[in-house]
Amino acid sequence: MDEYIVKKVLNNNVVIAQKEENEYVLVGKAIGFNSKKGTNIPKEKVEGIFIKQSSENNKFENVLKSVDSEIIGITEEIIAMCEKELKLKFNETIHISLMDHINFAFRRIEQKVKIENPFLNELSALYPKEYRLAEKALDMINSRFETQLPMDEIGFICMHINAAIKQEGVTDTLAYTKKIGQIMELISKLLKKKLDKESLAYARTITHINFVVERVLDKKTIKNELLDNIKKELYNEYDLAIKVAMRIENLFSIKIPEDEIGYLALHLSRLKEI
């Protein structure tokens, strides 16, 4: 049988359907429009699919009972959009975690509770693709529900997307981002100035630190041909870079080689100029 049979319409673009013994959440343009229980949906209309037969099945069933169907629908549209753009399949837990988060965001708005995300700049620099998709997701939510969830939600959605890509928990993404934020705070103190978080130099420094950590963990450190010149001409920045490297080592339990410290000194030099 090539057709799915509708069990429940979540919104115009998302339905819960059955095919043989399995249940699916299906996403497709206007797939739920004029559909009702028992309607047949040909497979060619399906753009995104989530099979409800996993270890998370019971959790998903509980969420379906407690969360508004429109919120479930927009969540599945967002996931399908991200998977299509990134050309990969997400960790299945995002179907519950993102849905739960969006539902909670609406409850906070209703209760006039403001929750800020202090890591927007760090997240934007660390995960640019995920951040861009999170911006689209927030636009989709605010447009569909004619509401104004704040910009801070971009950061939270970004973390959910990143966690789903890496097959890890949102708390892991948050913990990593917090560590990067602590390093940038240390740099600000060492340079004795408030850094412009919107500047290109700030974003580049975060990106560089991220790459340093990844290279060291992957044992793929690079040679710095300018190291001797950096030590002579940027001796103050190099001295500060040693302190930054020590903090990175402490936070990530790694050893930063001298060549990488030299590159850190160059970034500190740029930050001093902004």
Image: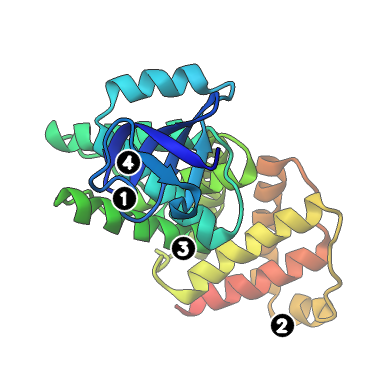
Q: Are marks 4 and 3 in contact (CB under 8 Å)?
A: no
Q: Residue at x 36, y 60 (%)?
A: 136
Tell which tag, 4 or 1, sits nearer the viewer.
4
Q: What kind of residue is marked 3?
A: Lys
Q: Under tag 2, what secondary structure?
A: helix
Q: Which residue is mark 4?
A: 73
Please, which residue is most extreme toward the front here? Answer: 1
Residue 58 % position (x, y): 48, 16
Residue under numbered circle 2: 233
- Residue that carries the numbered disc 3 in the rendered image: 192
Report the Cα–Cα distance between label 4 and label 2.
Answer: 58 Å
Q: Position of residue 248 (x, y in %)?
A: 67, 49
Classify residue 243 by image quadrant.
bottom right
SS of the residue under disc 4:
helix
- For the residues labelled 1 and 2, the Cα–Cα distance comes to 41 Å
The residue singled out by tag 1 in the image is 152
Dot 1 or dot 2: first in sequence order is: 1
Seen in the picture, residue 244 relative to 32 is either above or below; the reply is: below
Residue depicted at 84% across the width and 62% down the height: 221
